[in-house]
Amino acid sequence: MFSDASGKAFAACVFLRIECDNKVQIKLVQAKSRVAPLKKDPITKTKTEMSIPKLELLAAVIGTRLVQSVKTSLNIHGIQTFYWTDSKVVLCWIKNSGTWKTFVHNRIKDIHSSSSKDDWYYVPSPMSAADIVSRGCNAQTLFSLCWWEGPIWLKNRASWPDTKD
């Protein structure tokens, strides 16, 4: 699962990676995007954009929900799952316990209820499949990027991003 956000939208996409007879196939299974909500200032009553880290967190939430939906639909609960985000702030929230404000706390609780913090990894933005979805593009661009088959680097585990940090 890849999740990403921009000032305009947040998104997640789930790919299924199948290894069989030394061949690897990757296919898009499900994707979802949402327009970034505006938050209302309680004092001035004006609407402002939500912060990018909070939007990235919302993307991670819909991503974990998508993974659960795919696992249930395909009846594949015991498979290894990788959750990729380009937000180091979100990774910090997911991997560390802390006293977060209510918005963050509730969404981290949701993420922890359906995923393990050890299954979350950092991916640089240019390598994230969800980057396209969160920023928007036309259908021609999707086809030219072979988006439906996932990032090419997913085929070879040796070329996956370094996740030691």
Image (cartoon, rainbow, N blue to C red):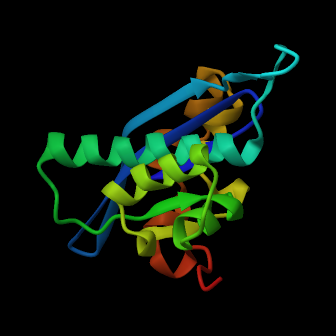
Residue 65 percent coordinates (x, y): 36, 42
Q: Residue at x 59, y 22 (%)?
A: 139
* Residue in the foreground of this view, choosing between 50 and 36: 50
Is residue 133 shown above or below 150? above
Residue 143 percent coordinates (x, y): 55, 32
Q: Residue at x 64, y 46 (%)?
A: 56
* Residue in the foreground of this view, choosing between 105 and 52: 105
| 151 relative to 82 in the view: left or right | right
Q: Quadrant of residue 54?
A: top right
* Residue in the foreground of this view, choosing between 53 and 76: 53
Q: Which quarter shows the C terminus? A: bottom right
Q: Residue at x 17, y 44 (%)?
A: 72
Q: Residue furthest left?
A: 75
Count of number-bearing discs:
0
| 46 relative to 165 in the view: left or right | right
Q: Quadrant of residue 18?
A: bottom left
Q: Quadrant of residue 45?
A: top right
Residue 129 in sight = no
Q: Residue at x 45, y 45 (%)?
A: 63
Is residue 163 shown above or below 153? below
Residue 156 in sight = yes
Q: Residue furthest top?
A: 45
Is residue 10 shown above or below 98? above
Q: Residue furthest right?
A: 44
Residue 57 percent coordinates (x, y): 59, 47
Residue 49 percent coordinates (x, y): 79, 27
Q: Residue furthest bottom?
A: 164
